[in-house]
Image (cartoon, coloured by chain):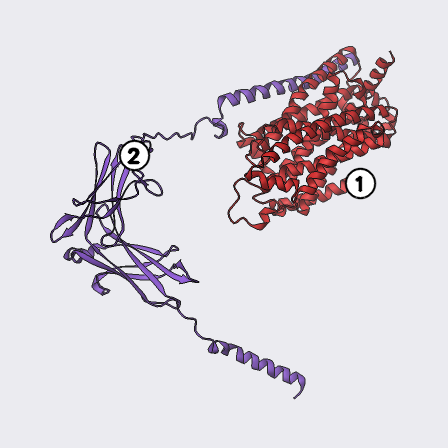
């Protein structure tokens, strides 16, 4: 066989072998997902769920985006379907309990919320659930600036106080909430009440000094996340000083401060007045010269 | 003139490229948004102040020996202020933005103050060049044959009405005196406002109350440096030894020493106190200047622009024409790099750096277009000086004659 033919045969063999490479390689093992289901009820209205999906990469948990989950009430069957959600960049997805499940919701004092993932090319199928008892939280603001939260659980057909639940009493702010005093949490007593003194008098409220108090039960094993809000006029009155369209150094040209306009324009008119006079002076000199000729 | 025109044409081509492709052809990015153009602008503004120093300050102070130098100073001032204005338009990218400055410009902004003051200074400089020229034009018109037709017509147009009458002299003298008084505050304002463009911006190295005086001291130094360079060149080229004497170099040398030391003093104020405090937010900028990337340039500018010229000019032998010329060149070159150092290192070290800033933003070296435009503008200014020196007498004839008569008496 001629050398060039040998080379050609070799190259051809290599070309045919290359596509078979995948056949020898082992399939990459699929990852495992951890699904955490959190229950929320705000102002004792419609309950909602927040699902968080994570996976472990190099020994560290990472949020997983784009995971499609099915949420169910009590059992993962068709009649108990809550919603289908997809996780965002933070690995989170939320859904409200639909009104179609109202009767199932009212039938029991405890409910289990189930989240299922059917699996995909990267991750194995996974499941997560959380069981919560029906509970509610109330808030009261006394004239002596004490804030009282009451945690109640549905037992049989009535609401009964719950003892020993940690409650956060706080003021609602733009980002994180601010506790009403230096204590981070308050625990309910046998009457289901937890009270704290409001010690943030200088906190700015709206124009009337209104601020929003919030009482929260966070990540409770039995009741999930409960919160309730109440507006009180305990803040400092805050009047927004809006300089928009006012005469300021940083306003538009038409809104320049009068003093700067007076100074700047008077200097300009003086100097340019002199310059214009000096230009006329040239014409005066010219006229003198022409008079001399004539 | 051919060489200067060629450099200008290359600069024009680079500007055409900048107009066509935008400011992306420059190396200026979000960090260094004022690069070599603004350094050059500050340099031109600084040099233009010489008109007020030589003409106005000397005149009002009764310094008679400075008369032969006034025309040189005024020509330099006019050329520099023209290119200071042009380089700002270049820096804006699209030239129509300059129009927007007048339409939307805010009187509260130092940029608008700068535009107003530069325009004012330009007109004062033109008038200050023109008024003392009138008697000289009358003399030039006597030499119709040697002047050439076009130039003769030009002289006739601008000054044939000057008959040298007592009334005309009186009006002219009065106007020159008014201009000399007016130009000093305007000159101070022009460079103070230029310094405020920086000082009103919260950046390391610019956050200084000393900036106005610091800039003016530097401007007088570079202006005087430019005058001695021009004096030497014109003296050699036109054989003006009789008018620009060694005594002029001796005296200008002394002035240069004074101004160098003054500027050195302001530099110490400007750098020693921040160096002593070494605030964390300014440390990178200061270390960059003193011992980092910009150190060779920084020490070159300090040594070449101030210390070495002072050492040369302190000695009597150093105040001969050639050493003074060399010192002048050093002052001017050092001053240009000093302006570059005022602008660039500061912009590379913002108080609040960008998150994940691209690597190209962290460094700045001008593109060839920027160099070409800058060198073109410097050549353009020199071209204007050359053209004006060819059209008009570089020594004020009438003034020098009058001064000689007064000295003889």
The residue that disc 1 covers is B2
Give the SS element for disc 1.
helix
Q: Residue B341 appears in which quarter of the rendering?
A: top right
Does B288 sit left or right of A256 as displayed? right
Q: Nearer the viewer, mark 2 or mark 1?
A: 2
3D distance between C-alphas at marks 2 and 1:
82 Å
Residue B244, percent across and down?
84, 25
Q: Residue B232 appears in which quarter of the rendering?
A: top right
Does B338 sit left or right of B64 as displayed? left
| Colour used to depict chain A in the structure image | purple
Residue A17, percent across and down?
53, 80
Which label is found at residue A199?
A: 2
Residue shown at 70% from the left, 30% from the top: B264
Q: Is residue B288 above or below residue B70?
A: below
In depth, the one of B48 and B94 nearer the eye is: B48
Q: Quadrant of the N terminus of chain B?
A: top right
């Amino acid at each position: 066989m001629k050398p060039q033919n040998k080379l050609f045969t070799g190259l051809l063999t290599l070309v045919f072998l290359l596509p078979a490479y995948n056949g020898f390689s082992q399939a990459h093992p699929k990852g495992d997902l951890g699904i955490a289901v959190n229950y929320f009820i705000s102002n004792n209205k419609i309950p909602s769920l927040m699902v968080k999906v994570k996976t472990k990469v190099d020994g560290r948990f990472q949020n997983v985006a784009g995971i499609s989950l099915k949420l169910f009430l009590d059992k993962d069957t068709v009649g108990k379907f809550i919603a289908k959600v997809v996780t965002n960049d933070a690995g989170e997805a939320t859904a409200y309990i639909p009104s179609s499940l109202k009767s199932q919701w009212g039938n029991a004092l405890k409910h289990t919320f189930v989240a299922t993932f059917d699996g995909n090319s990267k991750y194995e199928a996974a499941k997560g659930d959380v069981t919560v008892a029906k509970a509610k939280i109330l808030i009261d603001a006394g004239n002596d600036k004490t804030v009282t939260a009451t945690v109640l659980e549905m037992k049989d057909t009535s609401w009964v106080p719950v003892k020993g639940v940690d409650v956060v009493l706080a003021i609602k702010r733009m980002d994180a909430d601010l506790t009403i005093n230096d204590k981070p949490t308050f625990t309910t007593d046998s009457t289901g009440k937890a009270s704290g003194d409001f010690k943030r008098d200088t906190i700015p409220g709206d124009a009337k000094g209104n601020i929003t108090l919030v009482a929260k039960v966070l990540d409770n094993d039995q009741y999930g996340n409960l919160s309730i809000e109440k507006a009180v006029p305990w803040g400092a009155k805050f009047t927004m000083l809006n300089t928009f369209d006012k005469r300021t150094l940083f306003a538009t040209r038409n809104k320049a401060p009068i003093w700067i306009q007076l100074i700047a324009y008077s200097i300009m008119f003086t100097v340019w007045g002199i310059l214009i006079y000096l230009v006329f002076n040239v014409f005066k000199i010219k006229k003198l010269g022409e008079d001399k000729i004539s | 003139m051919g060489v200067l025109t060629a450099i200008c044409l290359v600069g024009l081509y680079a500007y055409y490229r900048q107009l066509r492709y935008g400011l992306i052809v420059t190396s200026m990015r979000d960090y260094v948004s004022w690069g070599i153009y603004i350094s050059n602008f500050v340099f031109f503004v600084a040099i233009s102040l010489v008109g007020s120093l030589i003409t106005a300050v000397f005149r009002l102070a009764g310094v008679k020996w400075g008369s032969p130098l006034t025309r040189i100073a005024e020509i330099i001032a006019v050329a520099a202020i023209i290119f200071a204005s042009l380089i700002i338009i270049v820096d804006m990218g699209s030239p129509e933005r300059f129009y927007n400055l007048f339409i939307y410009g805010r009187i509260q902004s130092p940029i608008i103050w700068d535009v107003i003051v530069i325009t004012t200074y330009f007109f004062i400089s033109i008038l200050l060049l023109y008024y003392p020229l009138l008697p000289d034009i009358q003399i030039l018109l006597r030499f119709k044959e040697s002047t050439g037709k076009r130039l003769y017509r030009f002289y006739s147009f601008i000054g044939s009405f000057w008959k040298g009458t007592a009334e005309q002299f009186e009006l002219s003298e009065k106007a020159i005196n008014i201009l000399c008084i007016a130009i000093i505050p305007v000159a101070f304002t022009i460079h103070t406002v230029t310094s405020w463009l920086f000082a009103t911006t919260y950046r390391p190295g610019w956050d200084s109350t000393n900036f106005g005086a610091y800039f003016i001291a530097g401007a007088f130094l570079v202006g005087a440096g430019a005058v001695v360079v021009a004096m030497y060149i014109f003296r050699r080229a036109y054989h003006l030894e009789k008018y620009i004497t060694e005594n002029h170099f001796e005296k200008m040398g002394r002035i240069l020493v004074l101004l160098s030391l003054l500027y050195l003093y302001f530099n110490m104020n400007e750098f020693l106190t921040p160096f002593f405090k070494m605030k964390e937010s300014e440390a990178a900028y200061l270390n960059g200047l003193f011992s980092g990337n910009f150190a060779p340039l920084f020490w070159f500018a300090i040594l070449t622009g101030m210390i070495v010229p002072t050492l040369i000019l302190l000695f009597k032998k150093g105040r001969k024409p050639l050493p003074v010329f060399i010192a002048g060149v050093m002052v001017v070159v050092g001053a240009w790099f000093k302006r570059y150092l005022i602008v660039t290192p500061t912009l590379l070290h913002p108080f609040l750096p960008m998150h994940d800033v691209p690597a190209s933003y962290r460094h700045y070296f001008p593109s060839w277009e920027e160099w070409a435009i800058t060198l073109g503008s410097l050549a353009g200014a020199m071209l204007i000086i050359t053209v004006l020196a060819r059209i008009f007498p570089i020594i004020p004839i009438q003034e020098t004659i009058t001064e000689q008569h007064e000295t003889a008496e």
